[in-house]
Amino acid sequence: FFCSELEDLWSLLPSLPLSSSFSLSPSSVLGLGALASITAYWLVTRPRPMRPPCDLKAQSVAVNVSEARRSAILKDDTLLEFYYDDTRTAYDMFQRGLMISGDAGPCLGFRKPGQPYEWISYTEVAEQAQVLGSGLLAKGCQPNPEQFVGIYAQNRPEWIISELACYTYSMAVVPLYDTLGLEAMVHILNLAEISVVICDREEKAASLLENKEKGTTPKLSCLVLFNDFSQAFVERAKSCEVEVLKLEQLMVSWGGGHQIPITCSHLNVGSFEIQQDDVSISYLPLAHMFERMIQVSMFCYGARVGFYQGDISLLMDDIKTLKPTFFPVVPRLLNRIYDKVSKRITPLLNYAVKRKQAELSSGVVRNNSLWDKLVFNKIQESLGGNLRFALTASAPISPAVLSFLRATLGCLIFEGYGQTECTAGCTFSMPGDCSTGHVGAPLPCAMVKVVDIPEMNYYAKNGEGEICIRGPSVFRGYLRDPEKTAEALDSDGWLHSGDVGQWLQNGTLRIIDRKKHIFKLAQGEYIAPEKIENVYMRCVPVLQVFVHGDSLQSYLIGIVVPDPEVFVDWAKDRGFVGSYEELCQNPDVKKAVLEDMSAVGREARLNSFEQVKDLYLHPEMFSVANGLLTPTLKSRRADIRRHFQEQISSMYSKKAN
C-alpha cells in the first residue's frame, strides 16, 4: 500500500517537457519544493511494519520427540524455563516490579462510583503483604508450600495483597469461588486441610461457617474479612470455635518474619513486551489461572493493574475511566463489541475497515491513521482510547470478528490457548501475524503434539488429534489425587488436554473439536457439542446456545438465549412484533431462528446429524449468578442439562409424536 500511496502522490505532478531547455517559473519551483518536502516528511513518518520474531510461514519447528513441535523463536530444542535468571518465583516477579517501579510507583488501582482511580504503590503493597503474612503465621500457619490458605473473594486489591502475603512466607493460595457448589467447596477445604480462609464479605464467610457448624469442615478455625461484619456473626462463629477477624486486625497482630518465596514452575508470559507504563483492567476471575498469569506478568515489569468495581454492568465505565493499555478479554465480550459496531455499519465504515485490514496484512498496526481519526475514534474511546494490545483466550473466536476488531480497535489482538494444568498458556499468536483461524504456535516453554483419536477419525499422521503438552509449564499433578493425575499426565509427562487440534502449514495450531464432551447419537455418530455451539454463536440473534443429545436419540436439540440487544429488531425485520419475552414464546420466531442457525451451520459445513432439529428460546442469560456458567464464562453442561430437563424432554417427546 506504500507504493500505491506514492503513485497517488506523484500523479499530482504536472507532465514536464522532455526538452533540456525548459525553464520553470518561481511559483512552480516553490510548488515542487513544497511537494518534495511533503514527500520527504511522509517517507520519514510513514507507518513502519512490525518485525515478527520469526518467519510467519514457519512459526513452529518439528522436534525429534514423538512428532512434537516447539516454538521457532528458540535456538534449539531446549525449552525456556525462566525469562530472567534471578526471577524464578511469583514472589521474585513482584520484587522485580518493585525494583523497577521505585518507591512510589503505582501498582493496584481501585475506584468508588463516579470517582477516578486511586492507586496503592508497589512499596505499600509489599509492606502490607509482609505484615499480613506475619499475621497468618501468628494464627498458626506454617511457612512452607504445604500450608494452604483459602481466598474467597471478588477481584480487588486485597485479593492480591493476600496472595502476595502467602508467597512471601512460602504458603500456597487456594482460590474459592461461588459456583463451586457446596460439595466441591467442602471437598477442597478438607483435601487441602485449610484452617484460614480470607473472604471479602460476611455473606461468603457465613456460607463457610455453615459447613463448619454441620461438622463437614473440621479444620476451619479462622475467617478473615475485607469488609465489616456484624457482632452477631462473630458470636455465631465463636460458638463453633471459629475466630473472625477484619483484615486490618490480622495485619497488626505480629511483626517480623522471613521472606521465603514459593517455587513457581516458570514465568509464562506471551510473546509481547509489557512496559512499565502499561495498565491492565482486572475483571476476569482471579480464581482462575488466566487472570492470575496476566497480573503476575504485569507486576514483573512494574506495570499497573486497575480493578473493576465488582459490578459487570459498570465494566465499560471502569474501562473508560482507567484507560487501559492492555485488555485481557474473552470472546464472548469481543462478540458483544462486534455486534454493537456492526449494527451501525455504513459504506464508509466498510471501506475504512478494508483499508485498515490492508495495513494489517502488511504488518502495520496503528491507531493514528486518517481512518482512526474519522471513523474508529468513538469505538476506540469506548475502551479508553489507549489500548496497545489485547489477549483473548478461554474459547474460540470467529475469524471475522477477530479481523474486524483488529482493524477497528487499532491495537494488537493476540489469541492464546491453554488450560490451568499448563499454567494458562501453551500456544500464542505472533506479533505481526494478522491471520485468523488459529491459536498461534507453541510458547517457548512448551512442546505440543497431537495424538490419534480413532473413534473420531483424527490421526496424527494427518496433523490432527488430541492436543498434548509437555514442558516446565505443565503441572506436576492434582493435589493428593494420583488417579486423576494419571488420567491427565501420561508416563512420559505429556498433559492430555481433551481438545482436538490441527497443525496448519505455517506451524500454528487450530482448535477444531473437543474430545471430553463427545457423545454418541442413537445411530452411532459421534457429536462434539462445543464445536457446534461455536458455529451457532455466529448467528446474529443468538447470544448463547447449548446443544444437547444422547445415545437414545437420533438428533440434536438446542437451548438458545437470544441477544436482547438485537433480537427485537432482528425479529421486526422479519415481520414479527412483540417484546423480547413475547418473541421467545412465538413458535414462528423460533422457526426463523432455527432456519438462521441451520444456514450458518451449512455454511460452516456441519454434517446433517450435527444440526439441531428443534430448539427452545430462553429469555434469561446463562450466568455465573444462576449457576449455568463458570466464573470463566464456560457452560456448566450438567447444570444446564438439569435446569432445562423439562424443555429437553418436551422437545424429544414432541418429535416422537
Image (spheres, grey):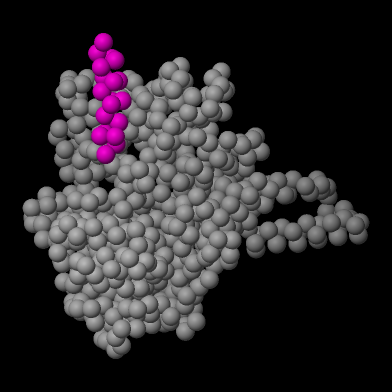
Left or right of residue 45, residue 586 in this image: left
**Residue 31: in sight, yes or no?**
yes
Q: Is residue 342 above or below residue 312?
A: above
Task: Examine the rendering and report whether any part of residue 504 can be seen.
Answer: no
Horizontal relation, residue 238 to residue 366: left or right: left
In this rendering, the answer to whether 110 lies above or below 642 is below
* Quarter of the figure with residue 608: top left
Q: Is residue 655 magenta?
A: yes
Q: Nearer the viewer, residue 295 or 129?
A: 129
- Residue farthest toward the bottom in the current orientation of the protein: 256
**Residue displayed at 12% across by 52% down:** 484
| Residue at the image point whose x is 28% and y is 42% from the top | 636
Q: Position of residue 175 (x, y in %)?
A: 28, 61
In the image, the segment drawn in magenta is: 639-657
Question: Is residue 75 toward the left or the right of residue 310 in the image?
Answer: left
User: Does residue 302 lie above or below 4 as drawn?
Assistant: below
Q: How many marks?
A: 0
Residue 535 in the image: x percent, y percent?
Answer: 37, 33
Left or right: where 22 falls relative to 52: right
Most foreground residue, 303 or 288: 288
Residue 169 sits inside the magenta stretch: no
Residue at image point 75% right, 62% down: 37
Front in this rendered view, residue 316 or 42:
316
Q: Which quadrant is home to the C terminus?
A: top left
The residue lying at 31 percent from left, 88 percent from top is 255
Furthest residue in direction top, as rendered: 657
Q: Position of residue 396 (x, y in %)?
A: 36, 43
Based on the displayed image, in which of its 4 quarters is residue 154 positioned? bottom left
Could you tell me what secondary structure mostly forms the magenta stretch?
helix
Image location (x, y in percent) of residue 374: 68, 48
